[in-house]
Image: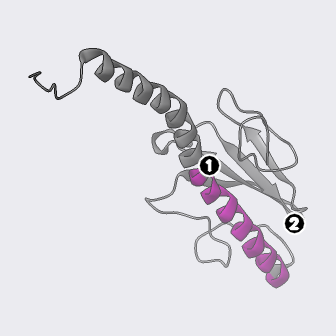
Amino acid sequence: MKAIQRGFTLIELMIVVAIVAILAAIALPSYNDYLLRGRLTEAHGELAAMRTKLETFYLDNRTYVGACAVNTVAPLPTGASLRFTYTCPTLTATTYLVRAVGIAASGTGGFTYTIDQANVRATTAVPAGWTTNATCWVTKKGGIC
């Protein structure tokens, strides 16, 4: 009578490990890009909300000067959970520019998004491997919006 062998050979185990490694090498970069795209939506939402708040401020005051301040209808977003810092570098009587700059520690470093009074949404800075776009907020590599 022959003895029945049970278990796996070393070659079989090495083949399984190689297959799992190949699948992980393909899936991990895609998953990381997916997570990053999810983080970028914070800036898109906050900038769109700021545009609405600034238009409300303008309707009340007939100027954008003085907006983006605490205790106005258009304060800048703040909080510990934010992945971007928000500023209003341009505030005149008839124009504004709101900027969101990614925070490196949160994984959004290198991204800069803007919006102005004409609703021009621009991506002015991106990390290496991405492409800027002057007419929309980039959400994927290659300047895709």
Residue 93's disc is 2
Q: Position of residue 70 (x, y in %)?
A: 58, 71
User: Along the horizontal axis of the image, is 43 left or right of 133?
Assistant: left
Q: Position of residue 14 (x, y in %)?
A: 32, 18
> Compared with residue 17, is residue 141 higher up or lower down, i.e. above or below?
below
Q: Looking at the image, can residue 19 be seen?
A: yes
Say which of 131 and 105 sits in front.
131
Mark 1 residue type = Arg
Q: Distance from label 2 to label 1 (Cα)?
A: 35 Å
Q: Looking at the image, can residue 66 be seen?
A: no
Q: For the point 79% across and 49% down, which residue is it?
A: 145
Q: Position of residue 28 (x, y in %)?
A: 49, 35
Say which of 66 and 47 sits in front.
47
The furthest residue to the front: 1
As for residue 46 lying within the magenta part, the answer is yes
Residue 37's disc is 1
Q: Which residues are magenta?
A: 38-60
